[in-house]
Image (cartoon, rainbow, N blue to C red):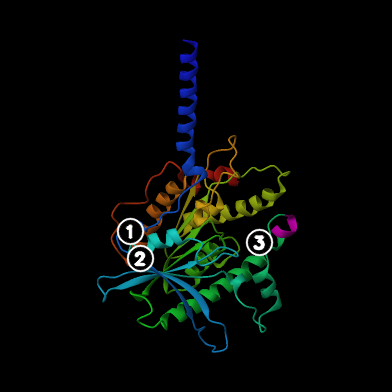
């Protein structure tokens, strides 16, 4: 009888451990999807495009996600992707494949920090272009407006060159044709700031998506007249000053959230906050193993597949409506318990 009790207890323990493993595996060892979510098959192309305006300038390395079109005469709207500070053109392959599979040609180049030095460039611009992000001291916060102006301007200039280079793309380079009259921009972090700036400055761009990037101290802060969707990680706005690594970054975030709150009320911007999300979760970094960083006493991060569902549910209908011009399939934005409007944190921004 005693032995039977031990066996039962052991079976219960094994069952609990097995159940915990099943529940935690998607968080700690997320699996990267092997196919796009949309109806169209997507092919990925790595190209080297001549830099427009100068035969001596280095070519632009670009990755293109294009539908393998059955209707060869169909033209697809163009979505430009801008990576984060120091990021690569392939940092959000899953998201961009999902967008392309809905009926877009998506093109991305590397962050400006990966470009070769230009001997004719302004030394101050070069210092900002090649430097690391800094937001960990009062001096960093004070210098941020100038850093923001310089770096977003450089990112905007590179994006303009990319568009010009794509217009010269040979017709047989990709299996889809591009409709250059319909252009949208999606960016992550620094790229999100560039996306918002591009929307404010370039009338050829009909809509933009800012994924956890800033708008404060940019041309977009004054307002945008065309649709802007901004999705942000919901963060702790009351960090301890002892946590220097986050304290001053949060001061910049407060300033940016104030600018975003004003944008959402005065212009064509929709701003949403996602709970349980880290900055890198807006890219394929969410598919990296979390087990080394996991702590049982911390809030459980959002699952990678759940984050993909949210991003796809927001971005794809938004881009179809604002860039492709398709009628909305449902009024407003989808509802997820993790997603709230920026107005919900207004009391914390006063």
Q: Are marks 1 and 2 in contact (CB under 8 Å)?
A: yes
Badge 1: how crowded within 10 Å, few (<14), some, or many (20+)? some
| Label 2 crowd bin: few (<14), some (14–19), many (20+), radius 10 Å | many
Task: Write the residue at 53% across / 65% down.
Answer: 83
Q: Nearest the camera: 146 or 339?
A: 339
Residue at the far top in the pictured view? 1
Note whether residue 268 is visible.
Answer: no
Q: Is residue 100 magenta?
A: no
Position of residue 25 measured from the top left corner of the image (x, y, whole percent)? 48, 41
Closer to the chain start, of discs 2 and 3, is 2
Q: Residue tagged by mark 3?
A: 133
State which region is magenta: 137-141
Give the main secondary structure, helix, strand or loop, of the magenta stretch: helix
**Residue at 26 percent of width and 75 percent of height:** 72
In the image, 331 versus 107, the foreground residue is 107
Q: Is residue 173 visible?
A: yes
Front position among marks 1 and 3: 1
- Identify the disc placed on residue 42: 2
Is residue 212 positioned above or below 234 on the image? below
């Amino acid at each position: 009888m005693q032995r039977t009790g031990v066996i039962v207890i052991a079976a219960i323990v094994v069952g609990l451990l097995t159940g915990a493993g099943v529940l935690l595996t998607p968080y700690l060892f997320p699996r990267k999807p092997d196919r796009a979510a949309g109806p169209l098959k997507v092919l990925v192309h790595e190209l080297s495009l001549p830099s427009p305006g100068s035969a001596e300038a280095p070519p632009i390395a670009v990755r293109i996600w294009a539908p393998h079109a059955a209707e060869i005469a169909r033209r697809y709207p163009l979505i430009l992707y801008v990576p984060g500070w120091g990021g690569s053109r392939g940092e959000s392959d899953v998201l961009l494949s999902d967008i392309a599979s809905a009926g877009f040609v998506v093109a991305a180049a590397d962050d400006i920090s990966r470009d070769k030095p230009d001997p004719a460039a302004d030394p101050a611009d070069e210092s900002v272009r090649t430097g690391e992000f800094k937001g960990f001291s009062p001096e960093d916060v004070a210098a941020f407006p100038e850093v923001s102006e310089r770096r977003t301007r450089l990112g905007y200039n590179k994006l303009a060159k990319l568009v010009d280079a794509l217009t010269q793309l040979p017709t047989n380079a990709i299996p889809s044709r591009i409709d250059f009259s319909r252009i949208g921009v999606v960016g992550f972090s620094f790229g999100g700031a560039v996306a918002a700036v591009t929307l404010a400055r370039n009338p050829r761009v009909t809509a933009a998506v800012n994924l956890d990037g800033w708008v404060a101290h940019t041309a977009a802060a004054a307002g945008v007249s065309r649709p802007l969707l901004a999705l942000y990680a919901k963060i702790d706005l009351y960090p301890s000053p002892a946590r220097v690594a986050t304290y001053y970054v949060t001061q910049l975030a407060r300033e940016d959230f104030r600018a975003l709150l004003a944008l959402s009320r005065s212009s064509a911007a929709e701003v949403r906050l996602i709970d349980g999300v880290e900055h890198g979760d807006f890219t394929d970094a969410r598919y990296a193993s979390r087990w080394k960083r996991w702590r049982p006493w911390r809030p459980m991060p959002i699952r990678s597949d759940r984050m993909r569902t949210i991003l796809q549910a927001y971005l794809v209908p938004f881009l179809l409506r604002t860039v492709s011009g398709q009628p909305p399939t449902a009024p407003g934005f989808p509802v997820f318990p993790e997603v709230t409007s920026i107005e919900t944190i207004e009391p914390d921004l006063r």
